[in-house]
Amino acid sequence: MKDKLLEAWSKMLSKLDHWFDSIILALPNFIIAIIVFTFVLFLSKQINKLVLKLLDRSSMQRSMKNLISKLVSAIVIIVGLFIVLGILNLDKALNTVLAGAGVLGLAVGLALQGALANFYSGVVLSYIHFFKYGDWIESNGYEGEITNIDLRSVTLKQSDNNLVYIPNKMVVDSPIKNYSTTAQSRVILTCGVHYDSDLKFVRDLVVKTIVERFDAVTSKQEVLFMYNEFADSSINFETRFWIKSTSALEVAKAKSEAIIAIKAEFDANDINIPFPIRTLDFPEGFLGGNTQNEVSAQRPSNE
């Protein structure tokens, strides 16, 4: 038993010596591999900057430029990995990995369907021209300025300065309202006036107020004014006009300014904006008649 233990111990020491010799022999290659991979990482960053600089001269979207530069950088790193594996004499291991890449790729593809869908959608969003950095859009119930488009999500900066990250697939599959595709935006304002108001005077006053308040409106013909409803307490109207802005926030500000200006003009001209009320109209003597009947009913009969 003792001889067997000594023999096993001797074999283990011999194995350790062989491993140590292998490590010593492979140490220069390992150091060279580290140096090469570090250089590859540095080179990929420099190539990324160079590609971006070259693409800045083109008319491509910023998101597309970022995508191309990242792909070129990734290709450089993959080539560097192949070189490092060759230096470490792991060519056979590499062939084994490549042989199993087909099955592994299928499994990974099934497991990462959502990520791959977002990746493909990110490529699509980076390519289309009506969807770019700085645009003010509305999608999936969120509204804001596009501040970033990557391979996973679209980043929107809302009017309250909060950031919203929407997965690319949801943006591609949903309707997109882009406020920045035109040079102007329309402001739509609704209000109501009392039934006793002079409707022609109200119309002229509102149109005049908007023309004087907003520089983008140069004539009365550019203001659309329409009465559209006989409501319970008021005659409602709608007015529309254009402003030079592509931001929904600027539209909201213009609407607020129009409300303030129109209210001030209405107050100055004694035009009433009624609120919902309910009027009870009793016939003359209705309350008095009921009272007399009630009193007569309560009197005892002398007959």
Image (cartoon, rainbow, N blue to C red):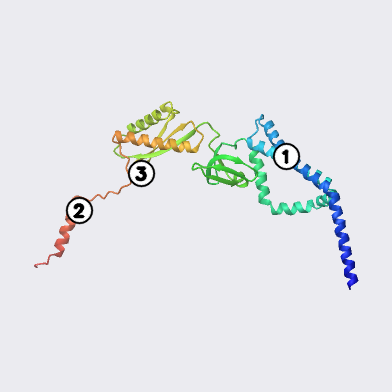
Query: In this view of the protein, can residue 75 be seen by the observer?
Result: no
At numbered mark 3, what does the secondary structure look like: helix, strand or loop? loop
Check disc 2 and report the residue beneath it. 286
Q: Nearer the viewer, residue 82 or 6?
A: 6
User: How many numbered marks are there?
Assistant: 3
Q: Nearer the viewer, residue 185 or 105?
A: 105
Question: Dividing the picture into quarters, in which one does residue 274 lie?
Answer: top left
Image-based side of 301 in relation to 79, left or right: left
Task: Give neighbour class at mark 1: few <14, some 14-19, many 20+ (Cα, 10 Å).
Answer: few
Q: Residue at x 79, y 51 (%)?
A: 101
Judge whether 98 appears above or below 135 on screen.
below
* Quarter of the image with the C terminus in it: bottom left
> In x, y percent, where is residue 103?
78, 53
Q: CA distance from mark 1 to mark 3?
A: 71 Å
Q: Residue at x 37, y 29 (%)?
A: 208
> In x, y percent, where is residue 199?
33, 34
At numbered mark 1, what does the secondary structure look like: helix, strand or loop? helix
Judge whether 51 appears above or below 120 on screen.
above
Check disc 3 and report the residue beneath it. 231
> In x, y percent, where is residue 204?
35, 30
Identity, as a three-letter code, of the amino acid under mark 3: Ala
Q: Is label 1 or label 3 in front?
A: 1
Q: Nearer the viewer, residue 10 or 102?
A: 10
